[in-house]
């Protein structure tokens, strides 16, 4: 019972994943990304090993389509898995195993892939895609959160969501944004609140790492 959105901002070069589910701690299992390389979402009877493996394939030069094919071919239990991948060009690919429960699907758009399983109905993913596309001038993190909110407003998944996560990478080996709500009655509201607090500080945390002298005494 998970829905996610992978996004890319050509202006900033950022890649990101936002995800939410009825389970605990979705940020530890579903979203994976590397600056300049791309992003992966792995869900439905989630195998977190597929995330780092997918990113490594992208880093080796594989396209999104090639990465998905390799992950499926190397995963004996692929029937249980749902995988979404975006490569460095912003191209996307996805896979739904034969045992993924309905309603499930994926919607692709420019610099975007939405995917989900055990959704309330088929309108959820198009709502996510439309919200992501609505304001291309906004920061990627904001667009990703808006997309999840639109998916929840459109019906979300069967059952109440419990956790949510936002992962965005830009230029460094570490994330620009890595915010997780592990257990909350309204995880998307909490995710938005945490992002609003963190957004003005995000560049400072990068500067502290790469150029500490620029941060004052």
Image (tube, helix red, strand yellow):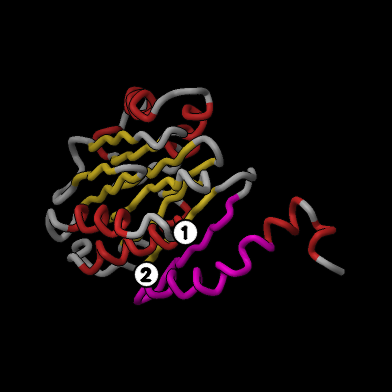
Camera-near label (1 vs 2) is 1
Q: Going from the N terminus, do you reach mark 1 or mark 2 first? A: 1
Which residue does the image show at 42% across and 36% down from the upper left?
A: 50
Name the spot of residue 66 as percent of width and height, x first.
Answer: 37, 23
Q: Is residue 90 magenta?
A: no
Mark 1 and mark 2: Cα distance apart in space: 17 Å
| Position above or below: 130 against 162 | above
User: Is label 1 in contact with label 2 (beta carbons under 8 Å)?
Assistant: no
Crowding near the residue tagged with mark 1, few <14, some 14–19, many ≥20 C-alpha atoms within 10 Å: some
| Position above or below: 176 against 51 | below
Front one among 11 and 155 = 11
Name the spot of residue 134 as percent of width and height, x first.
Answer: 30, 58
Residue 86 placement, left or right of 107: right
Magenta-colored segment: predominant secondary structure: helix
Which residue does the image show at 24% across and 34% down from the upper left?
A: 79
Residue 34 placement, left or right of 19: right
| Position above or below: 199 against 54 | below
Residue pointed to by mark 1: 139
* Quarter of the rendering containing residue 127: bottom left
Residue 65 placement, left or right of 217: left
Front one among 21 and 9 = 9
Name the spot of residue 2 as percent of width and height, x first.
Answer: 29, 55
Q: Is residue 197 magenta?
A: yes
Residue pointed to by mark 2: 188
Residue extent of the magenta highlight: 175-204
Please identify the quadrant where the C terminus is shown: bottom right
Please identify the quadrant where the N terminus is shown: bottom left
Which residue does the image show at 58% across and 54% down from the upper left?
A: 176
């Amino acid at each position: 019972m998970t829905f996610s959105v992978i996004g890319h901002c050509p202006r900033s070069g950022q890649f990101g994943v936002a995800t939410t589910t009825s389970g605990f701690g979705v940020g530890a299992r579903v979203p994976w990304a590397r600056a300049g390389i791309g992003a992966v979402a792995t869900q439905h009877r989630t195998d977190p090993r597929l995330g780092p493996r997918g990113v490594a394939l992208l880093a080796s030069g594989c396209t999104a389509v090639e990465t998905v094919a390799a992950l499926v071919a190397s995963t004996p239990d692929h029937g249980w898995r749902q995988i979404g991948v975006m490569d460095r060009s912003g191209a996307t690919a996805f896979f739904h195993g034969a045992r993924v429960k309905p309603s499930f699907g994926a919607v692709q758009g420019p610099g975007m892939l939405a995917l989900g399983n055990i959704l309330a109905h088929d309108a959820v993913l198009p709502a996510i895609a439309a919200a992501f596309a609505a304001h291309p001038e906004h920061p990627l993190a904001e667009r990703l959160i808006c997309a999840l909110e639109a998916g929840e407003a459109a019906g979300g998944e069967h059952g109440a969501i419990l956790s949510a996560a936002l992962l965005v990478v830009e230029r460094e080996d570490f994330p620009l944004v890595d915010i997780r709500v592990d257990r909350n009655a309204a995880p998307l509201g909490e995710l938005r609140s945490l992002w609003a607090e963190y957004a003005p500080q995000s560049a400072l945390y990068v500067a502290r790492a790469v150029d500490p002298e620029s941060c004052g005494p």
